[in-house]
Image (cartoon, coloured by chain):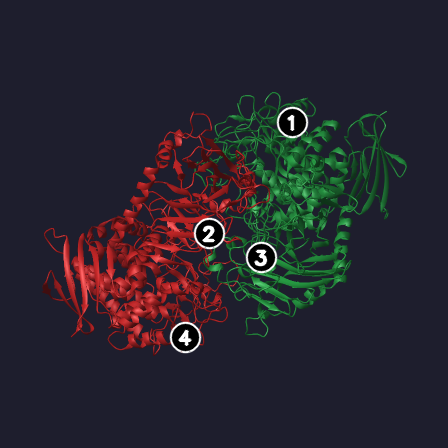
Chain colours: A green, B red
Amino acid sequence: MRFGFFDDLHLEYVITRPDTPLPWINYLGTESYFGIISNTAGGYSFYKDARLRRLIRFRYNNAPLDGNGRYVYLRDDDAAQPDFWSPTWQPTRTPLDAYTCRHGLGYTRIASQRKGITCETTYFVPLGQDLEVWDVHLTNQRGTAANLSLFSAVEFCLWDAFDDANNFQRNYSIGEVEVVDGVIYHKSEYRERRDHFAYFACSEPLAGYDTQREDFLGPYRGWDAPAAVEEGKARQSLALGWQPMGSHHVRLHLEPGESKRVIFVLGYHENPENDKFDPAGTQTINKKTVLPVIRRFLQPDVVSQALADIQQYWRNLLQGMQVDTPNEHANRMINIWNVYQLMVTFNFSRSSSYFESGVGRGMGFRDSAQDLLGFVQLDAQRARQRILDLAATQMASGGAYHQYQPLTKRGNHDVGSNFNDDPLWLVLAVTAYLKESGDWSILQEQVPFDLEHGSEDSLLAHMERSLNYTQERLGPHGLPLIGRADWNDCLNLNCFSDKPGQSFQTTTNREGKVAESVFIGGLFVLAAAEMEAVYDRLGLTAKAAELAAQRVNMRAVLNTAGWDGSWFRRAYDHFGNPLGSQECTEGQIFVEPQGMCVMAGVGLEDGRAESALNAVREHLGTPHGVVVLWPAFKQYYLHIGEISSYPPGYKENGSVFCHTNPWIQIAEARLGRGERALDYYLRINPSAREEISEVHRCEPYAYAQMIAGKEAVKPGEAKNSWLTGTAAWSYVAVTQWILGIRPTFDGLKIAPVVPEDWTAFDVQRTFRGVRYFIHVERVGAGNAVRLEVEGAPVEGDVVGIPSGGQTEVRVRAYLGTA
Amino acid sequence: MRFGFFDDLHLEYVITRPDTPLPWINYLGTESYFGIISNTAGGYSFYKDARLRRLIRFRYNNAPLDGNGRYVYLRDDDAAQPDFWSPTWQPTRTPLDAYTCRHGLGYTRIASQRKGITCETTYFVPLGQDLEVWDVHLTNQRGTAANLSLFSAVEFCLWDAFDDANNFQRNYSIGEVEVVDGVIYHKSEYRERRDHFAYFACSEPLAGYDTQREDFLGPYRGWDAPAAVEEGKARQSLALGWQPMGSHHVRLHLEPGESKRVIFVLGYHENPENDKFDPAGTQTINKKTVLPVIRRFLQPDVVSQALADIQQYWRNLLQGMQVDTPNEHANRMINIWNVYQLMVTFNFSRSSSYFESGVGRGMGFRDSAQDLLGFVQLDAQRARQRILDLAATQMASGGAYHQYQPLTKRGNHDVGSNFNDDPLWLVLAVTAYLKESGDWSILQEQVPFDLEHGSEDSLLAHMERSLNYTQERLGPHGLPLIGRADWNDCLNLNCFSDKPGQSFQTTTNREGKVAESVFIGGLFVLAAAEMEAVYDRLGLTAKAAELAAQRVNMRAVLNTAGWDGSWFRRAYDHFGNPLGSQECTEGQIFVEPQGMCVMAGVGLEDGRAESALNAVREHLGTPHGVVVLWPAFKQYYLHIGEISSYPPGYKENGSVFCHTNPWIQIAEARLGRGERALDYYLRINPSAREEISEVHRCEPYAYAQMIAGKEAVKPGEAKNSWLTGTAAWSYVAVTQWILGIRPTFDGLKIAPVVPEDWTAFDVQRTFRGVRYFIHVERVGAGNAVRLEVEGAPVEGDVVGIPSGGQTEVRVRAYLGTA
């Protein structure tokens, strides 16, 4: 069952009924002012930090769901009895005669009709601005004139979202606003240490306004039936304390067929610390610099152009790679939605979604490093800066802070370090950047450790320490010690947490000299191979050879202690017992080491890889994707930790933890099995799951972190959509390993591993400033490739960078052996 | 305007309409299971800790207000169209034909009638139990039979209230329940580290049940219109993940005039860590020990008796002191509500109310020490333990952790120490305990510093260090250094916080060797005098003399550097400039030093006290009480801190900060001005303010922390009711200083300072196990007292402790000079 459809031409998903299984959200903003918005206009906005600079109050997990947002009410002033509704359905949830929500890239447009009045509102954040626009178009489709009242409504968060939801003995006394010339200024705490305020403006003359929630709603009433709207009469309330909000009341007369446009602007503004007030010495906001911005974005032409600009911005970004394959779901995700999600994960890391409250987590070291694997293709400059920011939180030991704060860019001491895979991801992020950009200068950038002045060393040295960090922490079998956890934050083999409320990760009770990770072993082999290639290219052959020896060593260990007979083991616990082994009754096989080892090339030559992947298919494969482990843990194990805290089939305990699925896709591609790789790809592809939206429940245009596994009560139900490493890894898997268009240090490799029944596909890709037009056609079975560049045959499968200013390259690839 | 009335006979406040200006709450529980409940059944419960063991989900500051709680729905199953309502008004808010809410001591009873169906529900926590009972009585007042559906509904909090409101990527996957024999068990995280679960049981056979919120409510619906209730049909939903809840569905047939009683029990239960499951090895809750409890409290007779027991418990407690004075508001608060609030503040400190979310704060050192000043009279044993707990968080320096955690009893490192008044309050708490109990053994209790094993010393030594702490920290004028703040947490003279999000208190940027507090000076004089009396009684005359010298010294400083000419100054800031001086343009006069210095006896003999109190009356007196300072700060001052962060007239910046008002009442009593003392007492007495409930807005039966001051936008509006030191101090002021019935080391002092027109009053008080019947009658003007004990005249104004097993003492006091 669907709740809408893809409009690929307009780069939109169109939702055709408001009561989606869960609120289906979109993201607004590109640089510093961001927001989440649901298909019924719920959500909130913030400046840079979802906790510390939140503009709109949002109560997560409320009933009704998703009951705060960017609301507009319409009221029929001609009706005998009070008749009002929400043209975005929420919060009145009045039945509408027509409804669509178009989630586009960087904007959302919600259109509806009721009793002959159509209303279409477009929400977006203009490029380069710290504000959002609500562009409302009203049309009277009746045969008679209509007198309408239009009310806007937004509830202000008192900036710090944590404090806002907890410290009422203070908060109920500090709310402050100004209303001047119809502009509502929210200035709570501006009187003291804040240099910023919010404003909410309207393009039309006002019949009235409200800024105090209780006055607008009436006592004990909700957003579904504000008294001011019911009566058609704003209260002119001026908030001091309690719950400041903003509402404009506009009266409109519409002749039959007549349309009117009303623009609302909600924004964030900072004043110089020493020029906050005007006149100086008062407590009145200095509006000198904000008023020009407000005036500008209340102009219809400016708004129309700003929306066109954001659409163009996204069309430009998408142009980086466009494909035309036999599979529409692959096309749609590669060409539009997966790229969009790459940007969202880059901007938001794991902070703010319908499932991430924006209060708890900063930027993850491992998370952001992996997000870069896909993002490097979108914006190499921003990727470069992110790499340097990440590296600067690395410690002198080579270890990494597990998280850092986006505002200060400082490592988070509460969470600390000792997630022993973390440093290796930096190596992969840097080499992905090198391959994409060819910018080798980054390796010589001087970067401090733990932001400590004077500790600077080259980024190359940071990468070396990352690899050394693993080598200096090998366990009894010669495998890397796992520390607090490896990629799977919930596999806690040294923590032994036995009290509720303890962090599963940071309650470390064991020395950590025994528990080992096969997964980190595979990751080390992968990262070492990448690093060796870097050394080779830098002429550092001795270093390359030393690292190669370590890598070969690790491979040998993976093939012995890491091998269970039919698949790779997952780890050894504190007592030296294996996890992910036929010896176990639960957790016999885990997906991560199969994916990572085969991606690293381990077992490709001796049948182990094939055996491992066949075991994955047999034990972990489900129609909804590959589950993370099997059988799920049926009880909590002190020595295994959080993974066993989840009910079987959920989260790390046996769900389809989507992030890992692309690893299996890549591994299958490395084995040359195109059917299987694509099959796995499509099982979790959101577009391919659109038909079962009533089961999947999350958005069909964004990857989710997890889909309930085969041992769950409701298999196939997705959760935690949007902010997941699945976005980057899926993009890498399908574009670089299935379609096989893969950046290398020397050029663009063309090595598709696609199903036999794919007769042809086309790819356009910009790579190092050059546009590649690639046509792949199958000439026979198998994955052998023969290339023609500009009509001339070339050796091998890599298309080099053209010299001499050539900006376009045409490539034909003949796939298979005729 | 009133919203109800006092029913003193039944020890209840009766609310007669549901839409009170704010939710008016009551507290349930006496020992470990506690709850807050509003007049429409909103609120939540917890076991010991409002953050870590919360049973019911509650979203603070929601719209509509107060929309989670302990709900019952009724549905008329005979109606042609769905007809359902909430007999407690919330959450359907259906108009009721009759409504009353009786908030009693430890219970709340909400009764209503609609369309001939009456429903009366009594909520309470039985003594000694970790559960709450909802005792529902239904009666059909119609002339025809009625078929009804009764639904219960409670939404489970996943225990940690902070996590519950933030960590959805985890929480939406961990909810788990069992439903066995009609009992709903909430066991989220029980599978791992929790040894506790909640249960929700019903006395009647069920037509159905629900445990998943979305199934019960229906998609996108709120608690105001659950689909299951609308349709009269429970879904039998079994929650796994998302939002677990509990609802029972009971079908009832009531003949005309027939009544039925349905009992619900919601409780908390712990199992032994090694016997959590039954059968062992499963994940099924072991119910062996909980089932007998559940069965017991589903029996009507048991429930009736348990309610009678809690009523008797409170009647016994109130018997400790009963007065009959010419003022009904004084009588009512002294005899009932102020005592009740003493218990609430003792149990909850500042953690959980309609304004305190239960997430942030532990037990305050200063807060709890002051709460004891009143509480010692209620339960000396519990007071004794609290004193020892507090002292154990004192540091070796004599300084105190500003807060400690109620579960671990450990000092809170995040907030730390250096609130330089803190240690002195311990001295006052101990001497109040000594006077009330006569239990001098407490002084020899061995108590550690900072809970450190081996650091134990006597409580007496702790008190000495408290006083030394002040003496070792004197500033340029010889006044005590203020540290981070003194009693006024918002007067931050060393902090200079300039960034939003910083703690005003703990962002300390100055060495703190200059800023001084006149208030602490006064507090030192008061505490030193108390301590000298202790030394004297212990025969430690040298110590007494040494301390007396310090005290005399401090008095001298207060009379010079502490004196502004007409009143006491408040402090000196980091630059050596005075606060609370005529030299200032804002904050010319503060209430705290006037109250504290005069309470300490400073200025009584030379007219300074009278001058200071006259200045209070002139500059700080308002019809709503005495404001904390004047003129309020109109802007934020970096060197003054949080106090200037509030809008003028609110909170510490010029509100009636009620806590300080009893100090002025006591000070006026010390001056012998009974009219003024009583006048101030009545200005903030909640009962006396009942008539202006539409202005006051908070409960008329509980003190609030603040009432908006004369410079506020809405003077007279109260906030932050219930959890305030006002409870203890008001009780002390009116009972010990106005009525003048004051425990001393040697006996009960009778020293009334009441208005001239009070011709007589009676007091019954239990003191050291003896019942005193005290009749005071005025025989002339002034406050001189002549005593007769058992008909015989005695010297002085102290009634000694009778010897020889006498349990009752009759006292007549003749007041004034004839």
State the CA–CA distance, disc 4 to disc 2: 54 Å
Q: Chain of mark 3?
A: A
Give the labeled residue for mark 2.
Answer: B97
**Callout 1–callout 2 Cβ contact below 8 Å:** no
User: Horizontal placement of A757 versus B696: left or right?
Assistant: right
Does B624 appear above or below B411?
Answer: below
Report how far apart the C-alphas of labels 2 and 3 lie in the structure.
24 Å
Residue under label 3:
A226
Is the residue marked by circle 1 packed among few (<14), some (14-19), or many (20+) residues within 10 Å? many
Q: Which residue is mark 4?
A: B588
Report the mark closest to the observer, 4 or 3: 3
**Dot 3: few (<14), some (14–19), or many (≥20) neighbours within 10 Å?**
many
Element on which disc 2 rests: loop
Give x and y (percent) for residue B805.
Answer: 11, 51
Q: Which chain's residue wears label 4?
A: B
Instruction: Tell me, yes or no, whether the two marked residues, 3 and 1, touch with CB atoms within 8 Å.
Output: no
x, y percentage for residue B704?
A: 39, 60
Asked whether the residues under marks 1 and 2 belong to the same chain, the reply is no
The residue at 29%/69% (across/down) is B677
The mark lying in front, picked from 4 and 2, is: 2
Apparent side of residue A332 relative to residue B503 in the rendered image (left or right): right
> Callout 2: residue from which chain?
B
Badge 2: few (under 14), some or many (20 or more) residues near its Cα, within 10 Å?
A: few
Mark closer to the chain start, 3 or 1? 3
Chain bearing mark 1: A
Secondary element under disc 3, as helix, strand or loop, is: loop
Residue occupying the point 15% across, 54% down:
B808
Q: Disc 4 on helix, strand or loop?
A: loop
Q: CA distance from mark 3 to mark 1?
A: 51 Å
Label 1, on which residue?
A621
Q: Which x, y percent locates residue A88?
A: 66, 51
